[in-house]
Amino acid sequence: MNSEIYILAIESSCDDTSAAVLHNGKVLSNVVANQKIHSEYGGVVPELASRAHQQNIVPVVHQALQKANIGKKQLTAIAFTKGPGLMGSLLVGSSFARSMAQALDIPLIAVNHMQAHVLAHFIEEETQQKPDFPFLCLTISGGHTQIVKINDYLDMEILGETLDDAVGEAYDKSAKILGLGYPGGPLIDKYAREGNPKAYTFSKPRVGELEFSFSGLKTGILYFIQRETEKNPHFITENLNDICASIQHTIVSILMDKLEKAVKATGIKQVAIAGGVSANSEIRKQLKATETTKGWITFIPKFEYTTDNAAMIGIVGYYKYLTGNINTTDTKATARLSVEKE
Ligand code: KG4
Ligand code: ZN
């Protein structure tokens, strides 16, 4: 087999168009075009997302190749996000990847987006330690909240997940209630850093051991804000930092509490976080602290590999290529796809 493996990866599952080039598992380029258009709607509008992907895909792929300083002819294979995600968005990336692979006569590798968030921990980086198998991963994004046991690169088992909203949605919807922009997670995180996390309390959901639920919390926050702004119309602006800090404190303590239960249940102390919400400063801080308080070995992804990006798709493509797991894969885009399935 060729020892110089160049993978072009394409990610278009939601509202970020991204392309990356990896050389033997190392990232040469990772270009992400965010779609600003959704901000005014407080969430992703699927039709607008697929149209923006269509506009972005050619320049984004071109830039990724240019930054990596390689030509199309040097590519070994093309990896793309098969699912889960928005069907219209997935189709743009998958059709583009398919035609490019056909034109170049190289393998096309279908990648599960949720597996990619987890395997971002295996991108070759000088400073980054890789987990050993098995390890636990708390995958927290705009569409998912799950604790996964990773037995091997492509062998994953869901131990628990959300029964309703994802944690990223809880952040985004809270931000919308507060009149902040989209995505709301980074904004709440920013204001929270200046606020008092104990200023207000929100009740936590009572669900099964390793399950999550965030829809009740969202409603609780909505009613709380409505009540307080009736008494004082300036309540939000006068207390924004404390409100954000209290929301963040509640969410992060729910996540940490479940992780602790998963560690106890499995006896596995290697714990990773992944997905957009793993960019959050508080979850990163609290997870890191468990190294001294609980003796966990923790894995926190580099910031650029937390939210949607093609480098993480590329690393899965690389491992699939190495194991010869390429030509048998079903390459049709699939809106619903479990992390347990390739
Ligand atoms: O993984 P991702 O980019 O897309 C999905 O696959 O869903 O995750 C996006 C989510 C959004 O809900 C966004 O608000 C959240 O990640 N997010 C954050 C932070 N940065 C992004 N949530 C909390 N704190 C952050 N710093
Ligand atoms: Zn994602």
Image (cartoon, grey):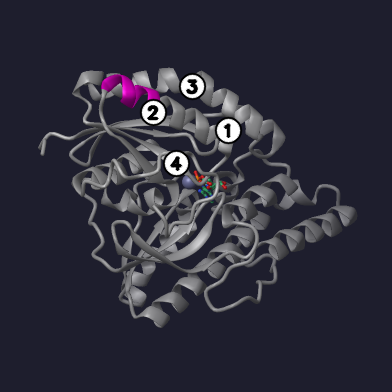
Q: Secondary structure at mark 1?
A: helix
The answer to whether one can see residue 308 in this image is no
Q: Looking at the rendered structure, which numbered label has been put on residue 162?
A: none
Q: Which residue is mark 1?
A: 88
Amino acid carrying label 1: it is Gly
Assess whether mark 2 and mark 1 are in contact (beta carbons under 8 angstroms).
no
Q: Residues within 10 Å of mark 3 (few under 14, many from 20)?
A: some
Q: Quadrant of the N terminus?
A: top left
What residue lies at 45% left-to-right and 23% top-to-bottom?
57
Cα separation between marks 4 and 2: 11 Å
Q: Which residue is mark 4?
A: 82
Assess whether mark 4 and mark 3 are in contact (beta carbons under 8 angstroms).
no
Looking at the rendered image, the disc whose residue lies closer to the viewer, 1 or 2, is 2
Q: Secondary structure at mark 2?
A: helix
Assess whether mark 1 and mark 3 are in contact (beta carbons under 8 angstroms).
no
Q: Position of residue 279 (x, y in %)?
A: 45, 49
Assess whether mark 2 and mark 4 are in contact (beta carbons under 8 angstroms).
no
Amino acid carrying label 4: it is Lys
Q: Looking at the rendered structure, which numbered label has been put on residue 56?
A: 3
Amino acid carrying label 2: it is Arg
Q: Which residues are magenta?
A: 98-104
Query: In the rendered structure, does residue 176 fall within the stretch colored magenta?
Result: no
Q: Residues within 10 Å of mark 2 (few under 14, many from 20)?
A: many
